[in-house]
Amino acid sequence: MKIGITSKGRDLDSPVDERFGRAAGFIIVELESMEYEWVDNSQTLSAPQGAGIQAAQNIAQRGVTHVITGHCGPKAFRTLAAGQIKVVVGATGTVREAIEQFRQGKLAVVTGPDKESHWA
């Protein structure tokens, strides 16, 4: 299973970025091997609108089945759902800790966004 976690840095010990659309980037992890790659998301940081959609399209190209983040807005959620990517919110701590919380079932897939559009 390949998952994407919003991250403020480039490795597993980086803090989870609580924002999806305006996250600094994503750590894409193959859960079985724990091999990972960094995907830069800086192109959406200054976007006046559509950051969630652009970020969702960016991560969908990586073949992930789940996205783990702090929060997800409605446009990003719809775009991810259209790509059959499940969304998990409520992640905190480091990327490594979020992965472990997900494995233990402490973070669950949600059925809708948990934030309104354009939040800081």
Image (tube, grey):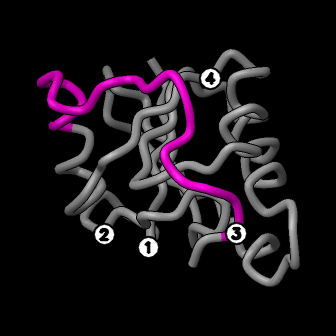
Identify residue for label 3. 118
**Mark 1 burial class by Cα count in 10 Å: few <14, some 14-19, many 20+:** many
- Residue at the image point whose x is 72% and y is 75% from the top: 42
Identify residue for label 4. 85
Measured Cα–Cα span from mark 4 to mark 3: 22 Å
Q: In which quarter of the image is the C terminus?
A: bottom right
- Residue at the image point whose x is 34% and y is 26% from the top: 31
Which range of residues does the magenta coloring cover? 100-118
- Closest to the camera, between mark 2 and mark 1, is 2
32 or 6, which is in the foreground? 6
Q: Which amino acid does label 2 sit on?
A: Pro
Identify residue for label 2. 15
Identify whether 117 is placed above or below 61: below
8 or 87, which is in the foreground? 87
Q: Sequence-wise, which precedes: disc 3 or disc 2?
A: 2
* Residue 90 in the image, given as x and y percentages of width and height: 31, 47
Measured Cα–Cα span from mark 2 to mark 4: 22 Å
Identify whether 39 is placed above or below 87: below
Measured Cα–Cα span from mark 3 to mark 1: 23 Å
Q: What residue type is labelled 3?
A: His
Residue 104 magenta: yes
